[in-house]
Image (cartoon, rainbow, N blue to C red):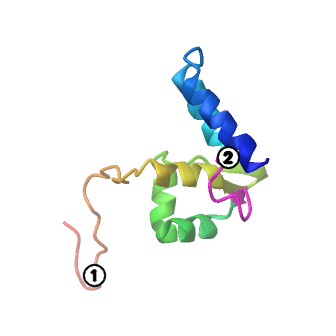
Amino acid sequence: MNPTTKEMLRVALANDSSVEPEVAEVILDLLAGKVPGRSRNSDGPLLLTMTQAAKLLGVGRNTFWRMVKDGVFTPVEITPHVFRYRRYDLDEFVEQQNVYRPVPRGMVRHRKSKGTVAA
């Protein structure tokens, strides 16, 4: 779109009191190239393996697996027993600045060392 046309639309939206502010904001976002409902990081696959998802978040696979078990992320079963994770869900998690706090698991079990007898 021509820059002059974009500027004319911005001025028209700013001066038209019949346009609701929420609608004007969406239109201005569209003019700026922001598409609602799409991931900001649209380069790359839409579905990620567990390893890719963990790497994207900067956590280990075990931590990511705990996040899945705790319901933070929902896997997508693309074929029987083959799961992927939506990049959009990961991006949303990051954009909302969520902090993951593991669900308490109760007592920590310790392995029995050799030569000891359990009571």
Residue 17 position in % (x across, y down) = 54, 17
Query: Which residue is at a point 56% across and 67% down the rendered structure image?
Result: 56
Mark 2 residue element: loop
Q: Is residue 33 magenta?
A: yes
Mark 1 residue element: loop
Inter-mark Cα distance, 2 to 1: 52 Å
Judged left or right of residue 81, residue 74 is left
Q: Amino acid at mark 1?
A: Ser
Q: Amino acid at mark 2?
A: Arg
Q: Which residue is mark 1?
A: 113
Residue 89 position in % (x across, y down) = 58, 49
Q: Is residue 37 something one can see in this rendering?
A: no
Residue 49 position in % (x across, y down) = 67, 64
Q: Is residue 94 magenta?
A: no
Query: Which residue is at a point 68% across and 49% down the rendered structure image?
Result: 33
User: Height in image: 85 above or below 6?
Assistant: below
Residue 113 position in % (x across, y down) = 28, 81
Which SS does the magenta portion mostly show? Answer: loop
Give the extent of the magenta segment.
32-47
